[in-house]
Amino acid sequence: MKKVAWRVDSLLSRDKRWKVISKSVQRNWQLYALIFPVVVYYFVFHYMPLYGIQIVFKDFIASKGILESPWVGMEHFERFFNGYFFWRLIKNTLGIGVYELLVGFPFPIFLALLINEVRNKYFKNIIQTVTYAPHFLSTVVIVGMIMIFLSETSGLINNVISYFGGMRIDFMSNADWFKSIYVFSGVWQQMGWSSIIYLAALAGIDPQLHEAAKVDGASRLKRIWHVNIPGILPTMIILLILNAGTVLSVGFEKVFLMQNPLNMESSDVIATYVYRIGILDAQYSFSTAIGLFNSVINFIILIIVNRISSRVSETSLW
């Protein structure tokens, strides 16, 4: 009898739950209609392709399909780990990712703090427009500009070096310069756009805190340090966790466009290697295994950084 009563209660609670959900959908159908295309996009392009991830454990043959291809287990992972390019790929990908995180993460914060202190409205709008604009340039245009400015024969940078009596440098063919060019050009392109979220967080800080700090005689610099930075600290931590989780996801397009045989020692990353192996050499299973390894490592880093953040501070993703 108790089991029957429990089942009846559970069925009634389910009915109530579904009625609440249906009423919520009817009341806010515009919001559900707005988010529906996003849900469909992620389902079609991010969840359905997971079916094909099983080819990392198979020797995929297109004529046989995924199910009929022979099973090889961990062979592709062992081949990658024991391969000639493994350590170079890890060193370059991790080096660029960490370099980009250390250099690129603080710049939007500094820019947002500086823009927030500008009192002239028109000058503030000009700064924001100038710093936002590079974000909307395509990667091809950005790399074209880099090549023009850094050209050994006619580039602006080399002309300045030559004017002051220095030797011209072939930046794009020098492996030692690749990482710095990649990172700082990315900082220039993205720091304005990335600062928007910090400006929004700064706008949410209670003005009374600044008034109280002024009454206590705090200078502008002290107010930035003791009011603004603590106010945006949770936002900074969340974005740091998210950025740390993509430290091995160095973008393909920009690296590929900047890459040449002379700087390959520093520019060859996991994304470009997967392109050569998967697209050019048609080794689909092997390239998929490398991509899965990259994603798993990023996921592990995300969990570790989030765990550290949750212990050190009260802010974390979960």
Image (cartoon, rainbow, N blue to C red):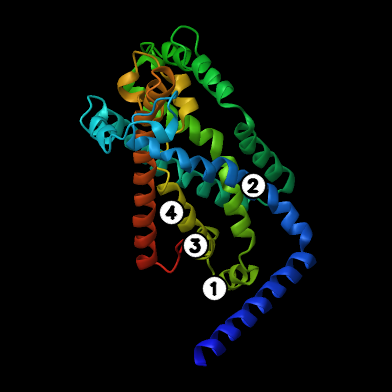
In this rendered view, identify the residue nearer to me: 43 or 145.
43
Q: Is residue 203 left or right of residue 175?
A: right
Amino acid type shown at disc 3: Pro
Marks 3 and 4 in Cβ contact (< 8 Å): no
The image shows residue 119 at horizontal and vertical percentages of 68, 52
**Gap in angstroms between the C-alphas marked 2 and 3:** 31 Å
Check disc 1 and give the amino acid type.
Asp
Say which of 78 and 310 sits in front.
78
Q: Is residue 94 left or right of residue 258?
A: left
- Marks 3 and 1 in Cβ contact (< 8 Å): no
- Quickly name the residue at label 2: 40
Q: Is mark 3 on a helix, strand or loop?
A: helix
User: Which of the 4 quarters of the picture holds residue 314?
Assistant: bottom left
Q: Residues within 10 Å of mark 1 (few under 14, many from 20)?
A: few
Where on the picture, by quarter, is residue 262? top left
Residue 178, percent across and down?
38, 24
Q: With respect to residue 61, does 67 lie above or below?
A: below
Q: Which residue is drawn at 46% across and 28% down?
A: 252
How far apart are labels 2 and 1 at the CA level? 54 Å
Q: Is residue 8 left or right of residue 269?
A: right
Quickly name the residue at label 4.
Answer: 241
> Residue beneath label 1, please?
216
**Nearer to us in this view, 150 or 182:** 182
Residue drawn at x 40%, y 25% is: 61
Residue 28 visible in image:
yes
Q: State the CA–CA distance, disc 3 to disc 4.
A: 11 Å
Tag 1's secondary structure? loop
Tell me which residue sits at (37%, 38%) in the image: 99
Of the residues shown, which amino acid type is indicated by label 2?
Val
Q: Given the image, on which type of amino acid does mark 4 rest?
A: Ile
The residue that mark 3 highlights is 234
Instruction: Say which label, 1 or 4, has the lower sequence index.
Output: 1
